[in-house]
Image (cartoon, grey):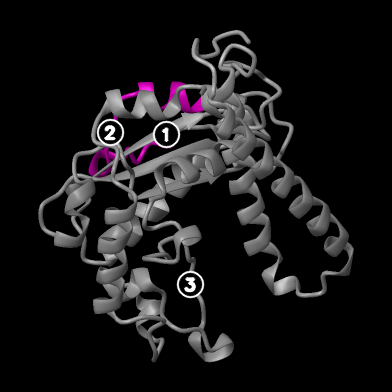
Amino acid sequence: MNGQRSHQMPADQNREFDALLSRIAESCAQLAELTPTWTDSAGMDRRDKKLKLISDQIQAIRHQMDPGKHEIISISLGRPDALSRFFAFNFVESETQPLENLSSERFFGSGVYAIYYAGNDIPPYQPISGTETPIYVGKAVPSNRTAETAFDQGPVLWKRLREHRKSIDSGGLKAADFRYRRAIIQSGMEGAVEDFMIRLFKPIWNKEFKICYGIGKHGDSAQTRGNKRSPWDTMHPGRAWAAATVEDQASQESIVLRIDEHFKKHRPIANKSELYSHLSLH
């Protein structure tokens, strides 16, 4: 085989390998028989993730057996995230800008943006201060989903960043401690690029990670909807409509603990060199 190790596997190991393959094949056949009878929808996601992990492990073993035969294609526009990676490369090439200097003069365009913490006053956020890991990633889409120019897309990125700046001010945070990046991109691609960047950076203010979400809320009414206060508003009280809410979704202590556990599990991307490694198509 191409790229195969030069030595032969001992006969006893050959037999053991083949026996394991037979057991895997039998197990797969049994799983296939059980699949149509599944009714436990609550466990489907868990099972699917486990199957995906096993599938990836088997593919890694095939590559290990014969790297030349199972070489991974580095660049393929057929990959679901390929175009998103190219947009992300362009995005991170731009320099971050001070959020406090966000111009009152509007700019046009839709796309994606990221907000970065660069301060020293909030201990739970220190692991990402000054790094390439944003604290929040978002998107702004145009009302005209087929808009072909930034002007036609409208000033939606500008408006969204201004909303976040106001929330940060209202929450008692210093705008000077935050920076941002923005990228105007093709209409219709905003969601795919945002999703890729959220999976890449795992920002703690994004709702997907259920840690300190809520900055994107626009003003729920606690009286009419009975909402509990978002973790973001618990950590950074000050928005008037959130203050009217009686109960927190989580205590500040538990939110801080979640943040600490998140950064231990997902080490922040410290610099551009690490970031480019994460963005490489492999």
Mark 1 lies on residue:
182
The residue carrying pointer 3 sits among few (fewer than 14), some (14 to 19) or many (20 or more) residues within 10 Å by Cα, namely few
Mark 2 lies on residue:
97
Mark 3 lies on residue:
219
Q: Image check: 169 left or right of 33?
A: left
C-alpha distance separating marks 3 and 2: 27 Å
Residue 82 screen position, x and y as percent: 60, 25
Residue 88 screen position, x and y as percent: 48, 28
The amino acid type found where label 1 is placed reads Arg
The amino acid type found where label 3 is placed reads Gly
The amino acid type found where label 2 is placed reads Gln
**Element carrying mark 2:** strand
Q: Residue at coordinates 74% horizontally, 32% vertically from top-left? A: 146
Give 199 or 207, whichever is nearer the viewer: 199
Image: magenta residue range: 87-106
Q: Residue at coordinates 68% horizontally, 56% vertically from top-left? A: 48
**Label pair 1/2, CB-CB below 8 angstroms:** yes
The quarter of the displayed image where residue 195 is located:
top right
Q: Image check: 110 left or right of 188?
A: left
Residue 228 screen position, x and y as percent: 45, 84
Q: Image check: 6 left or right of 162?
A: right
Q: Residue at coordinates 11% horizontally, 58% vertically from top-left? A: 121
**Quadrant housing the N terminus:** top right
Where is 246 relative to 41, above or below? below
The residue carrying pointer 1 sits among few (fewer than 14), some (14 to 19) or many (20 or more) residues within 10 Å by Cα, namely many
